[in-house]
Image (tube, grey):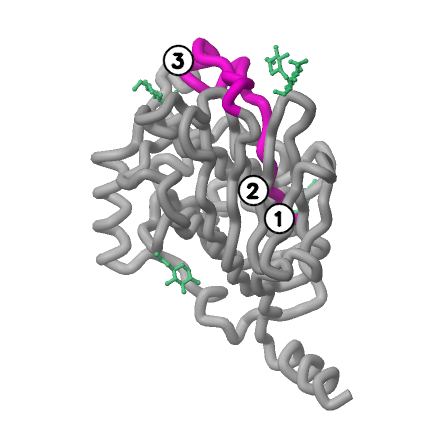
Amino acid sequence: MALLFLCLFLIHIGFSHHVSADFNSDFDIMWGNDHVRILDNGQQWQLTLDNSSGSGIQSKSEYLFAKIDMQIKLVPGNSAGTVTGYYLSSQGDKHDEIDFEFLGNLSGDPYIMHTNLFSQGKGNREQQFYLWFDPTADFHNYSVLWNPQLIVFSVDGTPVRVFKNIENLGVAYPKNQSMTLYSSLWNGSDWATRGGAVKIDWSKAPFVASYQNLNAQVCTSSSDCSANSWYSKAALDSSEQQKLQWVRKKYMIYDYCSNTKWFPLAPPAECTH
Ligand SMILES: *[C@@H]1O[C@H](CO)[C@@H](O)[C@H](O)[C@H]1NC(C)=O
Ligand SMILES: *[C@@H]1O[C@H](CO)[C@@H](O)[C@H](O)[C@H]1NC(C)=O
Ligand SMILES: *[C@@H]1O[C@H](CO)[C@@H](O)[C@H](O)[C@H]1NC(C)=O
Ligand SMILES: *[C@@H]1O[C@H](CO)[C@@H](O)[C@H](O)[C@H]1NC(C)=O
Ligand SMILES: *[C@@H]1O[C@H](CO)[C@@H](O)[C@H](O)[C@H]1NC(C)=O
């Protein structure tokens, strides 16, 4: 009872809920039931893929703004053709989505970290990166900060992508639809690796992606998060800016903003503001 009052009190003065790594209380299996392994009392879990199925999970709750750190160790060895997705998404055809997808590769060849962002059903905002470490050797943090002012994608605390709220310039911003957190591991043979040229080698199955130490501060439509510092962040500081520029310069391999086939006259407003 005392705890309930404390919770109500905290919600009242504007703090987010805390979600920590416990698979059993925070997630449901979406598909591939027997391809999800839950370890260490729910503190760690693994998604697996073989020639009979992949697997996917989703959070039990929906969030409206969140700061999420997830530690993931990607499929090791020959992971060509596999895709490990980790994303937030709302429902419906005018949906919002914040997307990380990790495209596997042959042993020793680099993964691609593919990102995208949908606002009210409009996507086509892909940016792709190589990573500056081997994402299969160890766990690394892949993080999303999503508040009313901006969305920041980060890897081990290094921002790799920022999307600002520029609704005033007519660009829809994800802020009125709650999103669920998803992760899945699936067969992307037809496009993932070198544009589909390298398929999954099923003799290497099962493919396994591992997760641990989810650390999330989340708001729900009924909660007010205004007392959290992450909620009011409106811009990167100068050291974060420098890191972002470093990643863009050295590791970015595709940016929709530079796609002159799609945008022969001028890139979309969010690319220049
Ligand atoms: C994997 O995907 C490819 C391309 O879509 C498809 O041809 C193949 O049958 C799939 N294999 C399995 C085992 O699901
Ligand atoms: C799937 O993999 C199993 C185990 O490696 C193998 O015995 C089976 O023949 C495979 N099935 C198909 C349809 O490739
Ligand atoms: C809220 O989201 C819906 C999509 O479900 C969209 O059609 C509507 O325009 C949005 N409203 C505002 C005020 O952004
Ligand atoms: C990953 O995130 C956790 C939880 O937020 C933090 O304690 C840890 O220091 C982070 N690790 C790295 C390598 O950034
Ligand atoms: C896989 O490796 C090739 C060769 O190094 C590279 O061109 C490609 O970008 C890598 N990643 C994917 C997912 O195809």
Range of magenta residues: 180-204
Question: x, y (%) of residue 32?
Answer: 71, 35
174 relative to 215, above or below: above
Q: Quadrant of the C terminus?
A: top left
Residue tagged 3: 261
Residue 67 visible in the current orientation = no
Question: x, y (%) of residue 123?
Answer: 54, 30
Q: Quadrant of residue 253?
A: top left
Residue tagged 1: 181
Residue at the location (57% across, 44% down)?
46
Check if residue 149 falls in the magenta segment: no
Ligand 3: which quarter?
Answer: top right
Point out the frontmost of discs 1 and 3. Answer: 1
What amino acid type should be assigned to the residue bearing mark 1?
A: Leu
Residue at the location (58% across, 23% down)?
187
Residue at the location (56% across, 54% down)?
44
Residue tagged 2: 87
Question: x, y (%) of residue 121?
Answer: 63, 33
Q: Can you name the residue that lies furthest to the top here?
A: 197
Check if residue 201 falls in the magenta segment: yes
What amino acid type should be assigned to the residue bearing mark 3?
A: Lys
Q: Quadrant of residue 63?
A: bottom right
Helix, strand or loop status at disc 2:
strand
Q: In the image shown, does 189 or 207 lie closer to the viewer? A: 207
Q: CA distance from mark 1 to mark 3?
A: 33 Å
Count of labels shown?
A: 3
